[in-house]
Image: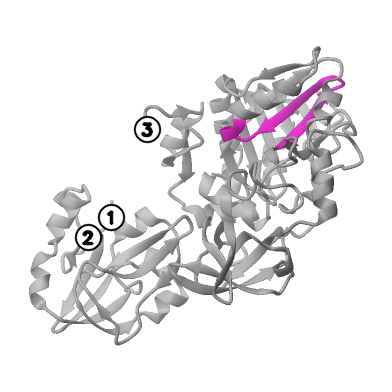
Amino acid sequence: MSSVPDDLKYSKEHEWVRVDGETATVGITAFAQEQLGDVVFVELPEKGARVKQHSSLGVVESVKAASDVYAPISGDVLERNVKVIESPELVNQQPYGDGWMIKVRLADKGELGALLSPADYRSHIGESAAAAGD
Amino acid sequence: MSELKRTPLHAEHVRSGGKMVEFAGYEMPIQYPTGIVAEHRAVRTNAGLFDLSHMGEFFFVGDGAGAAIDGLVSSDIAGLAVGQARYGLLTNERGTIVDDVIVYRLADDEYLMVVNAANIAKDRDHIQQHLPKGVGLDDRSAEMALIAIQGPRAATILSSVTDLEERERSIEGLPPFGVVRARVANSRAIVARTGYTGEDGFEVFVDNDRAPQVWSRLLAAGESTDLIPIGLGARDTLRLEARFSLYGNDIDESTDPIEAGLGWTTKLDKQFLGRDAILSAKERGPKRRIVGLEVTGGVARHGHAVTKDGTVVGEVTSGTFGPTVQKNIALAYVPAELAKVGTALAVRIRDRDIPAKVVKTPFYRRAT
Protein backbone atom coordinates (compact mmCIF):
# COMPACT_ATOMS: atom_id res chain seq x y z
CA MET A 1 0.00 0.00 0.00
CA SER A 2 1.50 3.31 -1.05
CA SER A 3 1.17 6.37 1.09
CA VAL A 4 -0.67 9.35 -0.43
CA PRO A 5 -0.39 12.34 1.94
CA ASP A 6 -3.52 14.47 2.17
CA ASP A 7 -1.77 17.83 1.92
CA LEU A 8 -0.38 17.37 -1.60
CA LYS A 9 -1.57 17.56 -5.19
CA TYR A 10 -0.69 14.85 -7.69
CA SER A 11 -0.16 14.31 -11.39
CA LYS A 12 -1.24 11.25 -13.34
CA GLU A 13 2.46 10.67 -14.08
CA HIS A 14 3.03 10.15 -10.32
CA GLU A 15 4.60 13.44 -9.27
CA TRP A 16 3.49 15.32 -6.19
CA VAL A 17 3.34 19.09 -5.58
CA ARG A 18 3.43 20.87 -2.23
CA VAL A 19 2.27 24.49 -2.59
CA ASP A 20 3.53 27.15 -0.22
CA GLY A 21 2.47 30.60 -1.40
CA GLU A 22 4.13 31.20 -4.78
CA THR A 23 6.49 28.27 -4.37
CA ALA A 24 5.86 24.65 -5.25
CA THR A 25 8.01 21.69 -4.19
CA VAL A 26 7.97 18.73 -6.57
CA GLY A 27 8.86 15.09 -6.10
CA ILE A 28 7.72 11.64 -7.15
CA THR A 29 5.19 9.62 -5.21
CA ALA A 30 5.71 6.59 -2.99
CA PHE A 31 3.86 4.57 -5.62
CA ALA A 32 6.26 5.77 -8.32
CA GLN A 33 9.39 4.89 -6.38
CA GLU A 34 7.95 1.46 -5.53
CA GLN A 35 7.37 0.82 -9.23
CA LEU A 36 10.85 2.01 -10.14
CA GLY A 37 12.72 0.06 -7.49
CA ASP A 38 16.09 1.17 -6.15
CA VAL A 39 16.87 4.62 -7.53
CA VAL A 40 20.57 4.99 -8.37
CA PHE A 41 20.73 8.24 -10.34
CA VAL A 42 18.78 11.49 -10.46
CA GLU A 43 19.17 14.24 -13.05
CA LEU A 44 17.51 17.59 -12.29
CA PRO A 45 17.36 21.01 -13.95
CA GLU A 46 19.59 23.76 -12.60
CA LYS A 47 18.45 26.81 -10.72
CA GLY A 48 16.96 29.33 -13.12
CA ALA A 49 15.82 26.76 -15.66
CA ARG A 50 12.20 26.94 -16.72
CA VAL A 51 10.04 23.85 -16.47
CA LYS A 52 6.77 23.45 -18.32
CA GLN A 53 3.73 21.53 -17.14
CA HIS A 54 3.62 17.98 -18.63
CA SER A 55 7.16 18.32 -20.03
CA SER A 56 10.10 16.30 -18.78
CA LEU A 57 11.96 18.09 -16.00
CA GLY A 58 14.53 15.41 -15.33
CA VAL A 59 15.25 11.72 -15.07
CA VAL A 60 15.36 9.12 -12.35
CA GLU A 61 17.21 5.91 -13.05
CA SER A 62 16.64 2.74 -11.13
CA VAL A 63 18.95 -0.24 -11.39
CA LYS A 64 16.73 -1.49 -14.22
CA ALA A 65 15.79 1.55 -16.30
CA ALA A 66 15.57 5.30 -16.79
CA SER A 67 12.27 7.15 -16.36
CA ASP A 68 11.36 10.74 -17.10
CA VAL A 69 10.05 12.96 -14.34
CA TYR A 70 7.38 15.29 -15.71
CA ALA A 71 6.76 18.76 -14.39
CA PRO A 72 3.33 18.80 -12.76
CA ILE A 73 3.34 22.62 -12.98
CA SER A 74 5.21 25.32 -14.93
CA GLY A 75 7.70 27.74 -13.45
CA ASP A 76 11.27 28.79 -12.81
CA VAL A 77 13.47 26.46 -10.79
CA LEU A 78 14.39 28.15 -7.50
CA GLU A 79 16.37 25.25 -6.13
CA ARG A 80 17.18 21.68 -6.95
CA ASN A 81 17.76 19.09 -4.27
CA VAL A 82 21.50 18.48 -4.26
CA LYS A 83 21.12 15.87 -1.54
CA VAL A 84 19.00 13.67 -3.76
CA ILE A 85 21.57 13.91 -6.56
CA GLU A 86 24.28 12.80 -4.15
CA SER A 87 22.14 10.15 -2.44
CA PRO A 88 19.53 8.93 -4.94
CA GLU A 89 18.27 6.33 -2.45
CA LEU A 90 16.49 9.20 -0.65
CA VAL A 91 13.85 8.96 -3.39
CA ASN A 92 13.03 5.46 -2.13
CA GLN A 93 13.45 6.21 1.54
CA GLN A 94 11.60 9.52 1.83
CA PRO A 95 9.76 10.28 -1.40
CA TYR A 96 7.72 13.06 0.26
CA GLY A 97 10.54 14.31 2.48
CA ASP A 98 14.26 14.50 1.80
CA GLY A 99 13.66 12.82 -1.57
CA TRP A 100 12.04 15.96 -3.03
CA MET A 101 13.43 17.09 -6.40
CA ILE A 102 12.94 20.77 -7.20
CA LYS A 103 11.34 23.94 -5.87
CA VAL A 104 9.64 26.07 -8.49
CA ARG A 105 8.22 29.60 -8.55
CA LEU A 106 4.72 28.95 -9.84
CA ALA A 107 4.16 30.53 -13.25
CA ASP A 108 0.41 29.97 -13.27
CA LYS A 109 -1.50 28.94 -10.17
CA GLY A 110 -4.40 28.02 -12.43
CA GLU A 111 -2.45 24.95 -13.51
CA LEU A 112 -2.95 23.50 -10.03
CA GLY A 113 -6.59 22.95 -10.91
CA ALA A 114 -5.58 20.34 -13.45
CA LEU A 115 -3.86 18.21 -10.79
CA LEU A 116 -5.39 15.31 -8.89
CA SER A 117 -6.60 15.45 -5.30
CA PRO A 118 -5.24 12.79 -2.92
CA ALA A 119 -8.50 10.84 -3.29
CA ASP A 120 -8.37 11.03 -7.08
CA TYR A 121 -4.73 9.97 -7.09
CA ARG A 122 -5.51 7.00 -4.84
CA SER A 123 -8.12 5.77 -7.28
CA HIS A 124 -5.72 6.52 -10.15
CA ILE A 125 -3.24 4.04 -8.65
CA GLY A 126 -6.00 1.61 -7.82
CA GLU A 127 -6.10 2.04 -4.06
CA SER A 128 -9.22 2.62 -2.02
CA ALA A 129 -9.69 5.68 0.17
CA ALA A 130 -9.73 3.34 3.17
CA ALA A 131 -6.07 2.58 2.52
CA ALA A 132 -5.11 6.24 2.65
CA GLY A 133 -2.26 7.95 4.37
CA ASP A 134 0.48 6.75 6.60
CA MET B 1 1.16 -13.19 -19.62
CA SER B 2 -0.91 -16.36 -20.12
CA GLU B 3 1.00 -17.43 -23.24
CA LEU B 4 4.28 -17.41 -21.34
CA LYS B 5 5.82 -20.56 -19.92
CA ARG B 6 6.17 -20.95 -16.18
CA THR B 7 8.85 -22.72 -14.21
CA PRO B 8 7.85 -25.26 -11.54
CA LEU B 9 8.70 -22.58 -8.96
CA HIS B 10 6.20 -20.03 -10.22
CA ALA B 11 3.94 -20.36 -7.18
CA GLU B 12 6.91 -19.89 -4.84
CA HIS B 13 7.83 -16.64 -6.57
CA VAL B 14 4.31 -15.30 -6.38
CA ARG B 15 4.09 -16.28 -2.72
CA SER B 16 7.37 -14.42 -2.04
CA GLY B 17 6.03 -11.30 -3.75
CA GLY B 18 8.19 -11.68 -6.87
CA LYS B 19 7.54 -9.12 -9.59
CA MET B 20 7.03 -11.34 -12.63
CA VAL B 21 8.19 -10.27 -16.08
CA GLU B 22 8.72 -11.90 -19.48
CA PHE B 23 12.18 -13.31 -20.05
CA ALA B 24 13.10 -15.66 -22.91
CA GLY B 25 9.48 -16.78 -23.21
CA TYR B 26 9.15 -17.46 -19.49
CA GLU B 27 7.41 -15.61 -16.72
CA MET B 28 10.29 -14.95 -14.33
CA PRO B 29 10.80 -12.88 -11.16
CA ILE B 30 12.81 -9.72 -11.88
CA GLN B 31 12.91 -8.85 -8.18
CA TYR B 32 11.28 -9.53 -4.84
CA PRO B 33 10.01 -6.88 -2.38
CA THR B 34 13.51 -6.48 -0.85
CA GLY B 35 14.64 -4.93 -4.15
CA ILE B 36 17.53 -5.44 -6.53
CA VAL B 37 20.20 -3.67 -4.47
CA ALA B 38 19.40 -5.61 -1.28
CA GLU B 39 19.27 -8.87 -3.25
CA HIS B 40 22.61 -8.10 -4.85
CA ARG B 41 24.19 -7.37 -1.47
CA ALA B 42 22.72 -10.53 0.04
CA VAL B 43 24.56 -12.64 -2.54
CA ARG B 44 27.84 -10.78 -2.02
CA THR B 45 27.76 -10.97 1.77
CA ASN B 46 25.53 -13.92 2.61
CA ALA B 47 23.60 -16.11 0.20
CA GLY B 48 20.85 -15.96 -2.40
CA LEU B 49 18.61 -18.50 -4.14
CA PHE B 50 17.94 -18.29 -7.88
CA ASP B 51 15.39 -20.04 -10.07
CA LEU B 52 17.16 -20.74 -13.37
CA SER B 53 14.72 -23.40 -14.54
CA HIS B 54 14.22 -21.55 -17.81
CA MET B 55 17.74 -22.52 -18.86
CA GLY B 56 18.29 -25.49 -21.14
CA GLU B 57 19.77 -28.88 -20.21
CA PHE B 58 21.08 -31.15 -22.94
CA PHE B 59 22.29 -34.61 -21.96
CA PHE B 60 24.70 -36.45 -24.24
CA VAL B 61 25.28 -40.16 -23.98
CA GLY B 62 27.16 -42.67 -26.02
CA ASP B 63 30.60 -43.74 -27.02
CA GLY B 64 32.38 -40.65 -28.34
CA ALA B 65 30.08 -38.11 -26.67
CA GLY B 66 33.04 -36.22 -25.27
CA ALA B 67 34.85 -36.07 -28.59
CA ALA B 68 31.68 -34.94 -30.33
CA ILE B 69 31.12 -32.07 -27.90
CA ASP B 70 34.82 -31.22 -28.05
CA GLY B 71 34.37 -30.69 -31.78
CA LEU B 72 31.59 -28.16 -31.23
CA VAL B 73 32.72 -26.24 -28.14
CA SER B 74 35.67 -23.86 -28.05
CA SER B 75 37.22 -24.99 -24.77
CA ASP B 76 39.00 -28.17 -23.75
CA ILE B 77 36.10 -30.60 -23.31
CA ALA B 78 38.26 -33.62 -24.20
CA GLY B 79 40.40 -32.76 -21.19
CA LEU B 80 37.52 -32.89 -18.69
CA ALA B 81 37.76 -35.59 -16.05
CA VAL B 82 34.58 -37.21 -14.76
CA GLY B 83 33.17 -34.81 -12.18
CA GLN B 84 34.52 -31.68 -13.84
CA ALA B 85 32.81 -28.87 -15.72
CA ARG B 86 34.06 -26.14 -18.06
CA TYR B 87 32.77 -22.96 -19.61
CA GLY B 88 32.98 -22.70 -23.39
CA LEU B 89 31.38 -21.37 -26.54
CA LEU B 90 29.36 -23.05 -29.23
CA THR B 91 30.75 -21.47 -32.39
CA ASN B 92 29.82 -21.78 -36.06
CA GLU B 93 31.92 -22.14 -39.23
CA ARG B 94 32.38 -18.36 -39.35
CA GLY B 95 33.88 -18.47 -35.88
CA THR B 96 31.12 -16.42 -34.28
CA ILE B 97 29.25 -17.27 -31.11
CA VAL B 98 26.12 -19.45 -31.27
CA ASP B 99 25.87 -19.62 -27.47
CA ASP B 100 27.92 -19.71 -24.31
CA VAL B 101 27.54 -22.92 -22.34
CA ILE B 102 28.86 -24.96 -19.46
CA VAL B 103 29.69 -28.61 -20.16
CA TYR B 104 29.67 -31.05 -17.23
CA ARG B 105 31.20 -34.53 -17.49
CA LEU B 106 28.93 -36.74 -15.40
CA ALA B 107 30.37 -40.15 -16.33
CA ASP B 108 32.78 -41.61 -18.88
CA ASP B 109 30.32 -41.25 -21.74
CA GLU B 110 27.73 -38.94 -20.21
CA TYR B 111 27.81 -35.16 -20.43
CA LEU B 112 25.43 -32.33 -19.53
CA MET B 113 25.46 -29.05 -21.43
CA VAL B 114 23.63 -26.06 -19.98
CA VAL B 115 22.53 -23.50 -22.56
CA ASN B 116 20.74 -20.16 -22.49
CA ALA B 117 16.94 -20.29 -22.41
CA ALA B 118 16.50 -18.13 -25.50
CA ASN B 119 18.80 -20.43 -27.49
CA ILE B 120 17.46 -23.88 -26.63
CA ALA B 121 15.85 -24.66 -30.00
CA LYS B 122 18.64 -23.00 -31.99
CA ASP B 123 21.41 -24.81 -30.10
CA ARG B 124 19.64 -28.17 -30.37
CA ASP B 125 19.35 -27.79 -34.16
CA HIS B 126 22.93 -26.60 -34.44
CA ILE B 127 24.31 -29.48 -32.39
CA GLN B 128 22.18 -32.14 -34.05
CA GLN B 129 23.42 -31.06 -37.46
CA HIS B 130 26.94 -31.87 -36.39
CA LEU B 131 26.49 -34.78 -34.01
CA PRO B 132 27.91 -38.12 -35.16
CA LYS B 133 25.73 -41.24 -35.16
CA GLY B 134 26.01 -43.10 -31.89
CA VAL B 135 25.91 -39.98 -29.74
CA GLY B 136 22.45 -39.10 -28.52
CA LEU B 137 21.26 -35.65 -27.49
CA ASP B 138 18.45 -35.72 -24.94
CA ASP B 139 16.99 -32.23 -24.49
CA ARG B 140 15.58 -32.33 -20.96
CA SER B 141 15.08 -28.54 -20.68
CA ALA B 142 11.33 -28.81 -20.26
CA GLU B 143 11.47 -31.46 -17.53
CA MET B 144 14.38 -30.20 -15.54
CA ALA B 145 14.60 -27.40 -13.00
CA LEU B 146 17.76 -25.52 -12.05
CA ILE B 147 18.18 -23.85 -8.68
CA ALA B 148 21.33 -21.90 -7.89
CA ILE B 149 22.49 -21.03 -4.41
CA GLN B 150 25.24 -18.42 -4.46
CA GLY B 151 27.20 -16.47 -1.91
CA PRO B 152 29.72 -17.01 0.89
CA ARG B 153 27.25 -19.03 2.96
CA ALA B 154 25.97 -21.16 0.07
CA ALA B 155 28.15 -24.20 0.85
CA THR B 156 27.04 -24.39 4.48
CA ILE B 157 23.36 -24.07 3.65
CA LEU B 158 23.40 -26.52 0.74
CA SER B 159 25.46 -28.99 2.71
CA SER B 160 22.84 -29.13 5.46
CA VAL B 161 20.20 -30.58 3.10
CA THR B 162 22.46 -32.67 0.86
CA ASP B 163 23.58 -36.30 0.96
CA LEU B 164 26.37 -37.24 -1.38
CA GLU B 165 26.43 -40.72 -2.88
CA GLU B 166 30.07 -41.13 -2.00
CA ARG B 167 30.32 -40.80 1.74
CA GLU B 168 33.87 -39.49 1.78
CA ARG B 169 32.95 -36.45 -0.25
CA SER B 170 31.35 -33.25 0.94
CA ILE B 171 29.72 -30.20 -0.57
CA GLU B 172 32.36 -28.02 1.06
CA GLY B 173 35.06 -30.21 -0.48
CA LEU B 174 33.72 -29.96 -4.03
CA PRO B 175 36.24 -27.94 -6.07
CA PRO B 176 35.16 -24.99 -8.25
CA PHE B 177 33.62 -26.40 -11.44
CA GLY B 178 33.28 -29.79 -9.76
CA VAL B 179 30.07 -31.75 -10.31
CA VAL B 180 28.53 -34.69 -8.41
CA ARG B 181 25.31 -36.62 -8.21
CA ALA B 182 23.66 -36.12 -4.87
CA ARG B 183 20.40 -36.13 -2.98
CA VAL B 184 19.25 -32.62 -2.14
CA ALA B 185 16.18 -32.35 0.09
CA ASN B 186 15.55 -36.06 -0.54
CA SER B 187 15.54 -35.53 -4.29
CA ARG B 188 17.83 -36.90 -6.96
CA ALA B 189 20.05 -34.05 -8.07
CA ILE B 190 23.15 -33.05 -9.95
CA VAL B 191 25.14 -30.52 -7.94
CA ALA B 192 27.89 -28.37 -9.44
CA ARG B 193 30.07 -25.67 -7.96
CA THR B 194 29.32 -23.22 -10.75
CA GLY B 195 27.54 -19.90 -11.03
CA TYR B 196 27.17 -16.52 -12.65
CA THR B 197 27.61 -14.10 -9.77
CA GLY B 198 31.31 -13.84 -8.98
CA GLU B 199 30.73 -15.53 -5.62
CA ASP B 200 31.25 -19.06 -4.46
CA GLY B 201 28.11 -21.02 -5.17
CA PHE B 202 26.34 -24.04 -6.52
CA GLU B 203 23.86 -25.01 -9.17
CA VAL B 204 21.43 -27.81 -8.41
CA PHE B 205 19.63 -29.66 -11.21
CA VAL B 206 16.48 -31.57 -10.23
CA ASP B 207 13.37 -32.89 -11.94
CA ASN B 208 10.55 -30.34 -12.16
CA ASP B 209 8.30 -32.14 -9.68
CA ARG B 210 11.02 -31.98 -7.00
CA ALA B 211 11.84 -28.31 -7.51
CA PRO B 212 9.32 -26.76 -5.07
CA GLN B 213 10.50 -29.08 -2.29
CA VAL B 214 14.17 -28.39 -2.94
CA TRP B 215 13.51 -24.64 -3.13
CA SER B 216 11.57 -24.45 0.12
CA ARG B 217 13.92 -26.78 1.99
CA LEU B 218 16.88 -24.63 0.97
CA LEU B 219 15.06 -21.44 1.98
CA ALA B 220 14.19 -23.00 5.34
CA ALA B 221 17.74 -24.24 5.84
CA GLY B 222 19.03 -20.74 5.12
CA GLU B 223 16.45 -18.89 7.14
CA SER B 224 18.67 -18.34 10.16
CA THR B 225 21.40 -16.97 7.88
CA ASP B 226 19.00 -14.76 5.92
CA LEU B 227 19.05 -16.66 2.63
CA ILE B 228 16.68 -14.83 0.29
CA PRO B 229 15.37 -15.45 -3.24
CA ILE B 230 17.07 -13.39 -5.96
CA GLY B 231 15.45 -12.16 -9.17
CA LEU B 232 16.82 -11.60 -12.64
CA GLY B 233 17.55 -7.93 -11.89
CA ALA B 234 20.22 -8.72 -9.30
CA ARG B 235 21.40 -11.66 -11.39
CA ASP B 236 22.27 -9.12 -14.06
CA THR B 237 24.05 -6.64 -11.76
CA LEU B 238 25.99 -9.49 -10.11
CA ARG B 239 27.16 -10.99 -13.39
CA LEU B 240 28.08 -7.62 -14.86
CA GLU B 241 30.24 -6.65 -11.86
CA ALA B 242 31.97 -10.02 -12.28
CA ARG B 243 32.21 -9.31 -16.05
CA PHE B 244 30.40 -12.40 -17.25
CA SER B 245 29.07 -12.08 -20.79
CA LEU B 246 25.34 -12.09 -21.38
CA TYR B 247 24.32 -13.81 -24.60
CA GLY B 248 22.14 -11.52 -26.72
CA ASN B 249 23.73 -8.44 -25.14
CA ASP B 250 27.50 -8.78 -25.16
CA ILE B 251 27.91 -11.75 -27.46
CA ASP B 252 25.90 -13.17 -30.35
CA GLU B 253 26.37 -14.52 -33.86
CA SER B 254 27.90 -11.24 -34.99
CA THR B 255 30.73 -11.38 -32.44
CA ASP B 256 33.81 -13.58 -32.39
CA PRO B 257 35.42 -14.83 -29.18
CA ILE B 258 38.57 -12.72 -29.62
CA GLU B 259 36.85 -9.32 -29.81
CA ALA B 260 34.45 -10.46 -27.07
CA GLY B 261 37.35 -10.97 -24.67
CA LEU B 262 36.65 -14.71 -24.57
CA GLY B 263 39.85 -15.84 -26.28
CA TRP B 264 40.71 -17.66 -23.05
CA THR B 265 37.85 -20.08 -23.72
CA THR B 266 39.22 -21.06 -27.13
CA LYS B 267 41.64 -23.95 -27.35
CA LEU B 268 43.09 -23.22 -30.76
CA ASP B 269 45.44 -26.21 -30.83
CA LYS B 270 42.49 -28.56 -31.26
CA GLN B 271 39.95 -28.83 -34.07
CA PHE B 272 36.45 -27.54 -33.43
CA LEU B 273 33.76 -25.93 -35.54
CA GLY B 274 34.85 -22.35 -36.23
CA ARG B 275 38.41 -22.86 -35.02
CA ASP B 276 40.07 -21.82 -38.29
CA ALA B 277 38.05 -18.62 -38.51
CA ILE B 278 38.81 -17.78 -34.88
CA LEU B 279 42.51 -18.45 -35.43
CA SER B 280 42.59 -16.03 -38.39
CA ALA B 281 40.64 -13.45 -36.37
CA LYS B 282 43.25 -13.75 -33.67
CA GLU B 283 46.15 -13.49 -36.11
CA ARG B 284 44.63 -10.48 -37.89
CA GLY B 285 43.95 -8.87 -34.54
CA PRO B 286 40.43 -7.66 -33.81
CA LYS B 287 39.22 -4.31 -35.20
CA ARG B 288 37.10 -3.81 -32.10
CA ARG B 289 37.27 -5.08 -28.57
CA ILE B 290 34.92 -5.31 -25.67
CA VAL B 291 36.04 -3.11 -22.78
CA GLY B 292 34.87 -2.27 -19.31
CA LEU B 293 33.73 1.33 -18.81
CA GLU B 294 33.23 3.38 -15.71
CA VAL B 295 30.74 6.15 -16.38
CA THR B 296 30.55 9.30 -14.26
CA GLY B 297 27.27 11.18 -14.32
CA GLY B 298 24.76 8.76 -15.76
CA VAL B 299 23.87 5.12 -16.16
CA ALA B 300 24.98 3.55 -19.44
CA ARG B 301 22.53 1.02 -20.90
CA HIS B 302 22.51 -1.59 -23.66
CA GLY B 303 22.42 0.20 -27.01
CA HIS B 304 23.86 3.56 -25.92
CA ALA B 305 26.50 4.95 -28.28
CA VAL B 306 30.10 5.27 -27.16
CA THR B 307 31.75 8.46 -28.39
CA LYS B 308 35.22 9.94 -28.61
CA ASP B 309 35.45 13.72 -29.07
CA GLY B 310 31.81 13.82 -30.14
CA THR B 311 32.07 11.06 -32.75
CA VAL B 312 30.32 7.74 -32.33
CA VAL B 313 32.96 5.01 -32.10
CA GLY B 314 31.20 2.11 -30.44
CA GLU B 315 28.24 0.77 -28.53
CA VAL B 316 27.37 -0.23 -24.98
CA THR B 317 26.25 -3.86 -24.77
CA SER B 318 25.52 -4.03 -21.01
CA GLY B 319 25.33 -1.27 -18.44
CA THR B 320 24.07 -0.71 -14.95
CA PHE B 321 24.79 0.75 -11.57
CA GLY B 322 26.95 -1.75 -9.71
CA PRO B 323 25.68 -1.96 -6.13
CA THR B 324 28.92 -3.43 -4.73
CA VAL B 325 31.39 -1.30 -6.68
CA GLN B 326 29.08 1.72 -6.22
CA LYS B 327 29.77 2.91 -9.76
CA ASN B 328 28.04 3.04 -13.09
CA ILE B 329 29.67 0.27 -15.08
CA ALA B 330 29.30 -0.98 -18.62
CA LEU B 331 30.67 -3.29 -21.27
CA ALA B 332 31.09 -1.79 -24.73
CA TYR B 333 32.65 -2.57 -28.07
CA VAL B 334 35.17 0.09 -29.13
CA PRO B 335 37.87 0.24 -31.83
CA ALA B 336 40.93 -1.75 -30.75
CA GLU B 337 43.05 1.41 -30.61
CA LEU B 338 40.68 2.89 -28.00
CA ALA B 339 40.56 -0.23 -25.84
CA LYS B 340 43.51 0.57 -23.60
CA VAL B 341 42.82 0.89 -19.89
CA GLY B 342 42.66 4.57 -18.99
CA THR B 343 41.35 5.75 -22.38
CA ALA B 344 38.91 8.63 -21.99
CA LEU B 345 35.65 8.07 -23.87
CA ALA B 346 32.04 9.09 -23.40
CA VAL B 347 28.64 7.43 -23.45
CA ARG B 348 25.81 9.27 -25.17
CA ILE B 349 22.97 9.29 -22.65
CA ARG B 350 19.87 11.29 -23.58
CA ASP B 351 21.78 13.19 -26.27
CA ARG B 352 24.61 14.20 -23.98
CA ASP B 353 28.10 12.77 -23.95
CA ILE B 354 28.76 11.61 -20.39
CA PRO B 355 32.43 11.00 -19.49
CA ALA B 356 33.53 7.37 -19.35
CA LYS B 357 36.87 5.71 -18.86
CA VAL B 358 38.15 2.31 -19.96
CA VAL B 359 38.87 0.30 -16.82
CA LYS B 360 40.22 -3.12 -15.95
CA THR B 361 37.70 -5.93 -15.59
CA PRO B 362 36.25 -7.67 -13.72
CA PHE B 363 34.79 -4.64 -12.00
CA TYR B 364 34.47 -6.80 -8.89
CA ARG B 365 36.58 -9.71 -7.75
CA ARG B 366 35.83 -11.46 -4.49
CA ALA B 367 38.53 -11.65 -1.87
CA THR B 368 39.91 -15.17 -1.67
| Residue occupied by mark 3 | B1
Residue type pointed to by label 2 = Val
- Mark 3, residues whose alpha carbon is within 10 Å: few (<14), some, or many (≥20)? few
Q: Are marks 1 and 2 on the same chain?
A: yes
Q: Secondary structure beneath disc 2?
A: loop
Residue assigned mark 1: A2
On the question of residue B218 being in view, the answer is yes
Amino acid of disc 3: Met
Quarter of the picture holding the C terminus of chain B: bottom right
**Residue B99 appears left or right of B109:** left
- Confirm or deny contact between disc 1 and disc 2 (CB under 8 A): yes
Q: Are marks 2 and 3 on the same chain?
A: no
Query: Is the residue A122 above or below the residue B223 in the image?
Result: below
Q: Where, by quadrant of the figure, is residue B333 drawn?
A: bottom right
Q: Nearer the viewer, residue A104 or B197?
A: A104
Mark 2 sits on what residue? Answer: A4
> Between marks 1 and 2, how big is the CA–CA gap?
6 Å
Which structural element holds mark 1?
loop
The span picked out in magenta is: B100-119
Identify the chain of the residue marked 2, using the numbered disc in the image.
A
Question: Which chain does the numbered disc 3 sit on?
Answer: B
The chief SS type of the magenta part is strand
In the rendered structure, which amino acid carries the disc numbered 1?
Ser
Q: Position of residue B215 (x, y in %)?
A: 57, 32
